[in-house]
Amino acid sequence: MKDAFGLPQSLLVLGGTSEIALATARRLIARRTRTVWLAGRPSAALDRAAEDLRGIGADVRTVPFDALDPDAHEEVLGKVFADGDIDMVLLAFGVLGDQASDERDPLSAVRVAQTNYTGAVSAGLVAAGALQAQGHGSLVVLSSAAGERARRADFIYGSSKAGLDTFAQGLGDALYGTGVHVMVVRPGFVRTRGTAGLEAAPPVTTPEAVATAIELGLRRRSETVWVPGTLRLLMSALRHLPRAVFRRLPL
């Protein structure tokens, strides 16, 4: 169960090698979290992530999980929940893709959409059902500010995050009053190993800043969290710009 401050004692991470997810796990372990499940494709990176979290005092277990294999989601996540209640599920998997390359290769573009949206719909519904069955818990969904409005530079990725964001909002409404809390997190550009070398318009954030915002959102039981907070006003302005003006911006 969550503690008096709304922080989880047990955590399931879908996307167990995500830098944002691991920064969040470290922050929560420093507070109260003691049991962590890292779900991801078996790899040396997943094993290293588990050892890192064990080193700071958590009981960490890994479980094979592939966003592109929705047929296995119910079985895989069912085994996790069968082992005991989960206070928080962090849906943190996703791929950026390569916009220019993906435009030339529709199958690659489809893979981005299937990972970021279809896989998330499947895993999100399975996790939500398990949380509802136990009667409590939070589902935290890592969305993106990129989903707020299509940009020429990343509309394939952005459209997949727009779908995920809308899905998560609707799921939160569907679960309202059941004891299950859904929180959508919309970071701006996050500096990670995966985004190293990419150009980004400000504001730019870090995995640690996103983790801090997630903790605060859990304490407040927020439904939507922007990182940084000022991004909310910026994206509101951009969303309402006339299309002819927006397409000329260097975004």
Image (cartoon, rainbow, N blue to C red):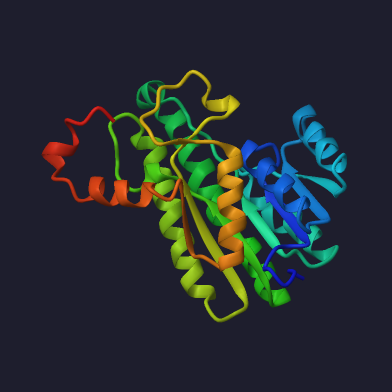
* Vertical relation: 17 (above or below) 234: above
Q: Is residue 121 visible?
A: yes
Residue 245 lies in quadrant? top left
Residue 169: give x, y in percent of width and height.
45, 63
Q: Nearer the viewer, residue 86 or 240?
A: 240
Q: Nearer the viewer, residue 206 or 183?
A: 206
Placement of the C terminus among the 4 image quadrants: top left
Q: Is residue 103 left or right of residue 212?
A: left
Q: Is residue 72 left or right of residue 160?
A: right
Residue visible at 83% across and 56% down in the picture: 34
* Vertical relation: 150 (above or below) 200: below
**Count of picture labels:** 0
Q: Is residue 123 visible?
A: no
Residue visible at 68% across and 53% down in the picture: 73
Residue 11: give x, y in percent of width and height.
74, 56
Residue visible at 58% across and 69% down in the picture: 181
Q: Is residue 208 left or right of residue 162?
A: right
Q: Which residue is most to the top?
A: 197
Residue 125 lies in quadrant? bottom right
* Vertical relation: 113 (above or below) 85: above
Residue visible at 77% across and 71% down in the picture: 1
Residue 128: give x, y in percent of width and height.
62, 66
Residue 158: give x, y in percent of width and height.
38, 40
Q: Is residue 163 left or right of residue 47?
A: left
